[in-house]
Amino acid sequence: MNIALLGYGKMGKEIEAIALQRGHTIVLKVDESNSITFTNEDLIKADVAIEFSTPQTVSANIKKCFNAQVPVAVGTTGWYDEFEMIQELCLQKNGALFHATNFSLGVNLFFKVNTYLAELMNKYDSYNVEMEEIHHIHKLDKPSGTAISLANQILEKIERKKQWSITDNSSETLFIKDVREGEIPGTHIIKYTSAIDEIEIMHKAHNRKGFALGAVIAAEYIKGKKGIFTMNDLI
């Protein structure tokens, strides 16, 4: 399979290594040097694109893929306020979009545990729920896309929480503590606390390989398809 890498930072290089191990070919690498100048002619050499750029460039890259009729798997976060527009454009262009706030299999299993626990805890209002997410200092969006996905799952199940915030810690708000330090790949902690005890679940990534492998598998899955897909379709 021929792959275009839209974003060639640390994640892009991890994806490249795993893609080559799985027998694929990288036909286009996009970084700061050519992020504006790469064209449809460059893209159509690829069977699929994997997008791990920045919140500022991701939407333009997705649109280029739709115009070139190249399926795209997107792991960049911080752009979901534009999702409805991108979704409509995908359908208009008869394109293919695979989007995930996190491609790690472990994180997507953690999503299911989080949803189930929140459903159980809804009836026990003596417990307050809070979150913490810890990432490397280079991560541009706060909170992380994974944290937002976890928070939205909790808000769907915990009726006493009305919104999430990284600044407001009032009773009806799900507070997310966001930490940026060192080179931490990603840690997400959800904690239910009462006067008598505490329940905590955590996912801790040891490196970027799980995210990269999931992105390549998503690209393999979306090749030749049309429509909009998520990790739920893959799992």
Image (cartoon, helix red, strand yellow):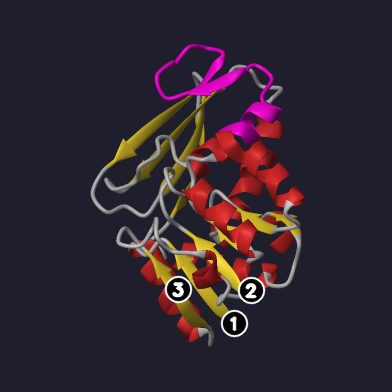
Foreground pick, 60 / 98: 60
Residue at left 44%, top 16%?
A: 169
Q: Which of 118 and 50 is in front in this view?
A: 50
Q: Residue 50 carries which label?
A: none
Q: Nearer the viewer, mark 2 or mark 3?
A: 3
Q: Position of residue 219 (x, y in %)?
A: 61, 69
Most extreme residue toward the left is: 182
**Marks 1 and 2 in Cβ contact (< 8 Å):** yes
Image coords of residue 228 (percent x, y): 72, 54
Residue 161 located within the stretch drawn in magenta: yes
Q: Which residue is disc 1 drawn over?
A: 1
Lateral position of residue 184 relative to residue 44, left or right? left
Question: Tag 2: Cα neighbours inside 10 Å, few (<14), some, or many (≥20)?
Answer: some
Which residue lies under the disc numbered 2? 220
Quarter occupied by the N terminus: bottom right
Please give the range of residues in magenta: 151-174
Per the model, the C-alpha gap separating discs 1 and 2 is 8 Å
Is 82 rendered above or below residue 89? above
Q: Which amino acid does label 3 sit on?
A: Leu
The residue that appears at 41% across and 49% down in the rendered structure is 54
Residue denoted by label 3: 28
Residue occupying the point 53% across, 24% down:
164
Give the CA separation, mark 1 to mark 3. Answer: 12 Å
* Element under disc 1: loop
Which is nearer the eye, 26 or 137?
A: 26
Q: Position of residue 57 (x, y in %)?
A: 44, 48
Report crowding for label 3: few under 14, some 14 to 19, many 20 or more residues within 10 A (C-alpha).
Answer: some
Secondary structure found at label 2: helix
Q: Which one is in front, 158 or 148?
A: 148
Residue depth check, mark 1 versus mark 3: number of the one nearer the observer: 3
